[in-house]
Image: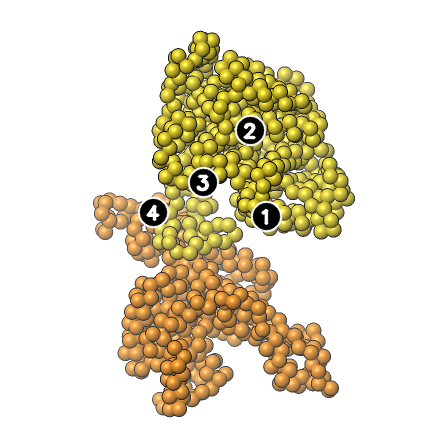
Amino acid sequence: MKNSTEPTPKANPVIRLLGLGEAGVKLVETLAMIGPGGIETYSLDTDNRSLARCHQSQTFLLGQAIPCGLGTGGDSALARAAVESDSEHLAGIVRGADLVFIVAGMGGGTGTGAASFLANLAKEAGALVVGVAATPFDCEGIRRCNEATGGVRDLKQVADAVFHFPNQDVVLMEGANVSLHEALEIANRHLCEAVLGVSRMLLESGMLNVSFGDLQAALRGRHSLASVVYVDASGDDRAAAAVRKLLTHPAARGGEALQEASTLLVHLSGEEMTMAEIDAVTGAIGSHATTTNLVVGASGPGRDGAGLQLTVVIAHAAKLGELGQEQVKAHPDPTGQASGLGFSGSFSVLDTGSYFDLGKDTGDTSRGGFAYTPPAPTADALTPECREDLIRVAAKEEPNRKKRQKIVQEMLPLEIVSKGRFEKSEPTIHQGEDLDQPTYIRRGAVLN
Amino acid sequence: MSNSQIIVGLEIGTSKVCVAVGEVSENQVVNIIGLGQAKSRGVRTGEIIDVALAEEDVRNAIVEAEQVADVEIRSVFLGVTGSHIRGFNNTGVHPVVSADREISTTDIQDVIKNAKAINLPTDHSVVHSIRQHFRVDGQDGVQNPEGMLGAKIEVDVHVVSGRYNRLQNPIRLVSGLHLEVENISSSALASSLAILSMEQKELGTLVIDLGAGVTEYAVYSSGVIKHTGVLAIGGDHVSNDLAYGLKVPLARAEQLKIDHGSAVIDLEAGDREIDLSDDSLIPGRQVNLGHMQKIMSMRLQETFELIARDIGQAGLIEYLRAGVVICGGGARIPHITRLARDVFNLPVAIGRASSVSGIKNALDEPEFATPVGLIKFGVFQSLANPRRAGFGRVIRRQVAALFGR
């Protein structure tokens, strides 16, 4: 599976953190500053200015030939073209890694367009690929939100799992009166904590280990949205406080997400943890997740000393209904979708296609609102070098067509489970299960 | 006849409205003299969704019962159910303050009053509060502490509560038919009254009433009710699952369930096909019996498992020495006892109304447990608060009704 050049067994998994686009670069830069050792960080962007601000991580300018270091201006197809022209170098970056985090802010150009391609490269290099995607606030406009959803979905189809952080959650959590600056800070903190939590879980040698194997078993090949909740608490009652914080976290949805998860990786760290505290935390999580595979790890004092730090990775099995739900969420305003006059903007992301992929089946069968493909680039809009570049890469890509089609196809909810006569009555919810739906469907029995 | 009293039980169920008329002789022997039934159309999962239809069905059932029993029905004991009904236990404590430490009647009344003082949400009201056992200075299982010596007296009560508005809906409906509702009882309690013997209550029994809209259950142990619960899952869910899984209309699924249903999967059933061409629009339409049994079995098994889990959490599963008794329309499903035995690991029986005499039909059928039980409930009520239906009372009641509206 792994194309690693050195076959010698490693003490720790090789974790690489790739920041894509402006938001991703910023986050990676922050993480590189505070993060535990043993993580290699890379900042990738199409914009020279954003890379110029990086001091901690290794930088690489994407698409030297096409956007020429000026950014994509929100054009994800351009970002895709840029990242594809640099695929050789990028393949070098991901080679030999065990775990690749791709951190990107969705909704703009570079993050949205390039993340799935980069994920694919990392995947081909044999790494476990985890996308970390932040999606914009609702107030940033439907167009941007739609682009972001498209980006997350594209990334999800390639990456093993995507940790999804809707910025809007911060508003839900902190109330609408939070200042923009604070909101962004909190959103960034959540993201950083997620990545740090997972890497700490893997790198810190603990008393009870959650290993890379556990993470791999939970996420590999799921192609679903996962989430990471990181909370810390201190004081006498720190275990109970941590559980409370966990359950009120938007990603846990009051414990519902725990119940629905297929695997939970729970990692605790803190000074002088007592058995009672571990018991209280795992017991509380266990009571919410009765059918879930629970993996518990614990290690000594973390970076904050006295506090108790709890990291929970909530992994889902890929679900049939997921796509449908997601689309409902993604398009809160159907009229906005219908009146989407800025077609090329709104829907270019729904097609993974870049300029190189035009007219070629990429295996992406996800459906957007319209069966719309962006127009081919007009010849005079490109510089001669660009054109040469495009043709060269396109020619090189041609024989690989088969390989590209291996991208796992996401399943549509072909069977919409109706509740028949109970459709309109009060739903009978029992421990997160809707009992009005036929039991045999909920339990996955097959009638053949 | 002149000394006997007429008590009527009315259950407005999801599949049928049922009225049972009982004649109680002076020595408290109940004799069922009439039954009235009507197909229920205005009820879903135990609660009224169409008042006009439900009213018509209740009227039909009452009229039928009046004709069969040859009496005029003025008042009924009404069974109430629905997913909003909860059962829980509460304890009341009272210190014995008298100098000689002898427990007096006032002490007993006080402790019961304390136990019944429950903090309920404002929109909830109490349906029952049933006294369990007394404890005197920690000595458990005291049935009547009057005259005993002690410093502290405690009592456990089982409280059944529900949302006030949703409880009022069926009461208002019955009042609208110019019938008086003497009292309401949760259907689970009524069914258990009808079918359990004293020994079964003493040994510990779980009663499951598998209705069309809801499944109710009650646990008896040491002669008192310990736990009740309502699950908003019933026979309708089975039919609905079948309709969905076999892709047949709901009415046909209902009929299939009655004709070919089974609670366990029969190994040979996988090869058998049921021909639906007699009434299907598509000639030659067949459904696989194995699939049908699988769908049914999974739903019923899940229902039992949910009950088992709830009772397990209440810590009562060890106390069910007399096993499980199933009643309600669901008790007619073939092999239901086998499935229940597998889930609960306890002996399982179909409940039949005992300790009442009268129309054979009413006593043999498990689905009449609730109305028959309501009559027994009515007998206990009238024993507890005897009131003779004199002329003065009728007048008083009518005046009260005038001003009470």
Read off the residue under disc 2: A104
Whether residue A119 appears in this view of the structure is no
Q: Is residue A39 above or below residue A260?
A: above
Read off the residue under disc 4: B246
Q: Nearer the viewer, mark 3 or mark 4?
A: 3
Q: What element carries label 4?
A: helix
Q: Which of marks 1 and 4 is in front?
A: 1
Alpha carbons under labels 2 and 4: distance apart = 46 Å
Let me know if marks 2 and 3 both belong to one chain. Answer: yes
Q: Quadrant of residue B389?
A: bottom left
In the rendered view of the protein, which quadrant contains the N terminus of chain B?
Answer: bottom left
Within-10-Å neighbours for mark 4: few <14, some 14–19, many 20+: some
Q: Which chain is orange?
A: B
Indicate the position of residue A124 as horizontal and vertical percent values.
Answer: 54, 21
N-terminal of the two: label 1 or label 2? 2
Residue visible at 39% across and 37% down in the picture: A336
